Image (tube, grey):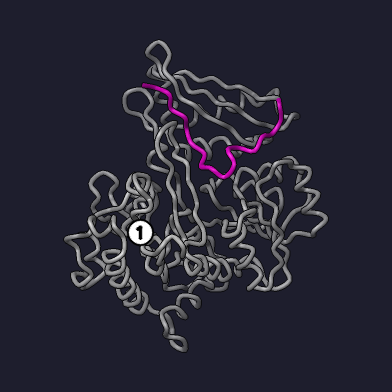
């Protein structure tokens, strides 16, 4: 088993090539970059000049001292993203607009300089070397039409690796995409979990790639297992978000968890209620600080994602930290009845193993004082008749749903949608729509 390629990449950043990478070297590098970033944003960002007025870089004697610094939230960015800029707007190469997940509110705008984008291309080049090598053909099922988009940066990273990147964009027609996979003799797919699942199930195992990287939305374990079974391929997962510069962490061949982009980003796990830091092994909210970005650095940014640092060493042998795969978002948890909590992850693991299921939407409403959970199911035509019973049976095995139903606090409804597969919400996160007041 090969050690994660991120180790040599970070070794080059730390500047100790020729020596084995150590935790001490990583953390010394992070502390230097953290001090530089704090000084940079206090001097150049109007937001951080105010937000960190009482927090100086000189006060950072160790990484743990960062715990005293205030968090940055998505709401802070939405309120006035230009206040975060540390360079003139003429130096900005790419602006990404992220719509709010609700029905109202301003969008987030994230700004990148050319050098900021270069950092991501470099990460993609090394991170993808676990899945692809020189001459391998990689189909990119991610938005890539605009310069500086995630697909475009990935294409540039693959070029440096010597692999052949094939831009595609989101899957809009499964048959067309399967034809492209066969015609281009694709070795590796990179895309959104539910879209790649649809390719595998609608294609009946046709055009099987050797490797898959699931990205953009979190990857249910059930989806990875179905893909491995149908296509007999290796399935890797990637964790990233626009605020991170698209790339944040990726699995190695051990499939033990994510190895993080520790040369560019400093990760923490905190209690989402109190904000206090958690120890290794405790699951909480993922927080990150950018260490090398110049255009729009972020200090202790709260992602809303949940995970934990795995205390055990990764079998690949790296000294890099390992983060457990993201299970979902804090805001995605909904209450059923008086006290039962339902997550999108629980629904995913219950439903995606069902034969023929392609995707589903889920909404929660209240009717006559009782919660109502409604699922819209997209399934293969050949499985349509039996799918409703299978879905209801699977839902009853989810502990929170079972308990709420037994208390007569919840009713279930399932709609099998016959119009065929529809690309689900583009590249957005899948979530439970809660319309209760």
Q: Tell me which corner region of the image, top left, top right, bottom left or bottom right, holds residue 427.
A: top right
Is residue 435 in the magenta section? yes
Residue most extreme to the top:
368
Name the residue at 22% across, 56% down: 50
Q: Residues within 10 Å of mark 1 (few under 14, many from 20)?
A: many
Q: What is the magenta segment's predominant secondary structure? A: loop
Q: Tell me which corner region of the image, top left, top right, bottom left or bottom right, holds residue 360.
A: top right
Task: Determine whether, in the image, residue 262 is placed left or right of residue 421.
Answer: left
Residue most extreme to the bottom:
18
Vertical arrangement, residue 308 with respect to residue 436, above or below: below
Vertical arrangement, residue 82 with respect to residue 250, above or below: above
Q: Residue 115's x, y, as percent? A: 48, 70
Task: Determine whether, in the image, residue 312 is placed left or right of residue 164.
Answer: left
From the image, which quarter does the N terminus lie in?
bottom right
Q: Residue 323's x, y, as percent? A: 42, 59
User: Is residue 249 visible in the rendered structure shown here?
Assistant: no
Vertical arrangement, residue 381 with respect to residue 276, above or below: above
Camera-side residue: 6 or 426? Answer: 426
Q: Residue 60's x, y, as percent? A: 22, 70
Span colored in magenta: 419-437
Name the residue at 35% across, 48% down: 80
Name the residue at 27% across, 66% down: 43
Q: Residue 213's x, y, as percent? A: 61, 57
Residue most extreme to the left:
54
From the image, which quarter does the C terminus lie in?
top left
Is residue 10 in the magenta section? no
List the residue tagged with mark 1: 298
Assign a secondary structure to mark 1: loop
Name the residue at 66% across, 50% down: 169
User: Is residue 222 visible in the rendered structure shown here?
Assistant: yes
């Amino acid at each position: 088993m090969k050690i994660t390629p991120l180790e040599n990449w970070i070794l080059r950043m730390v500047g100790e090539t020729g020596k084995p990478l150590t935790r001490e070297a990583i953390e010394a590098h992070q502390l230097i970059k953290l001090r530089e970033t704090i000084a940079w944003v206090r001097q150049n960002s109007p937001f951080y000049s105010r937000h960190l007025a009482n927090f100086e870089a000189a006060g950072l004697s160790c990484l743990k001292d960062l715990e005293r610094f205030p968090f940055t939230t998505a709401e802070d960015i939405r309120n006035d993203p230009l206040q975060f800029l540390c360079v003139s707007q003429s130096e900005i190469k790419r602006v990404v607009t992220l719509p709010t997940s609700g029905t109202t509110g301003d969008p987030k705008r994230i700004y990148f300089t050319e050098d900021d984008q270069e950092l991501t291309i470099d990460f993609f080049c090394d991170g993808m070397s676990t899945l692809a090598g020189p001459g391998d053909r990689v189909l990119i099922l991610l938005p890539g039409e605009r310069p500086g988009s995630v697909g475009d940066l990935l294409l540039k990273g693959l070029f440096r690796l010597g692999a052949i990147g094939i831009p595609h964009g989101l899957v809009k027609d499964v048959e067309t995409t399967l034809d492209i996979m066969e015609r281009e003799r694709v070795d590796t797919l990179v895309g959104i979990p539910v879209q790649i699942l649809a390719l595998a199930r609608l294609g009946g195992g046709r055009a099987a790639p050797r490797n898959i990287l699931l990205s953009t939305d979190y990857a249910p374990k059930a989806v990875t297992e179905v893909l491995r079974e149908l296509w007999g391929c290796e399935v890797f997962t990637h964790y990233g978000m626009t605020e991170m510069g698209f790339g944040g962490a990726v699995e190695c061949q051990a499939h033990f968890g994510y190895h993080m982009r520790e040369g560019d980003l400093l990760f923490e796990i905190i209690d989402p209620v109190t904000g206090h830091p958690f120890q290794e092994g405790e699951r909480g909210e993922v927080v990150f600080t950018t260490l090398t970005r110049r255009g729009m650095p972020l200090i202790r940014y709260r992602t809303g994602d949940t995970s934990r640092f795995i205390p055990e060493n990764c079998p690949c042998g790296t000294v890099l930290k390992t983060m457990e795969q993201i299970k979902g978002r804090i805001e995605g948890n909904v209450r059923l009845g008086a006290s039962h909590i339902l997550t999108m992850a629980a629904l995913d693991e219950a439903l995606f193993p069902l034969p023929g299921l392609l995707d589903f939407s889920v909404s929660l409403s209240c009717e006559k004082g009782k919660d109502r959970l409604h699922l819209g199911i997209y399934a293969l035509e050949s499985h349509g008749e039996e799918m409703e019973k299978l879905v209801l049976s699977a839902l009853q095995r989810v502990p929170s749903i079972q308990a709420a139903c037994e208390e007569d606090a919840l009713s279930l409804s399932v709609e099998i949608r016959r119009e065929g597969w529809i690309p689900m919400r583009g590249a957005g996160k899948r979530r439970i729509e809660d319309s209760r007041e």
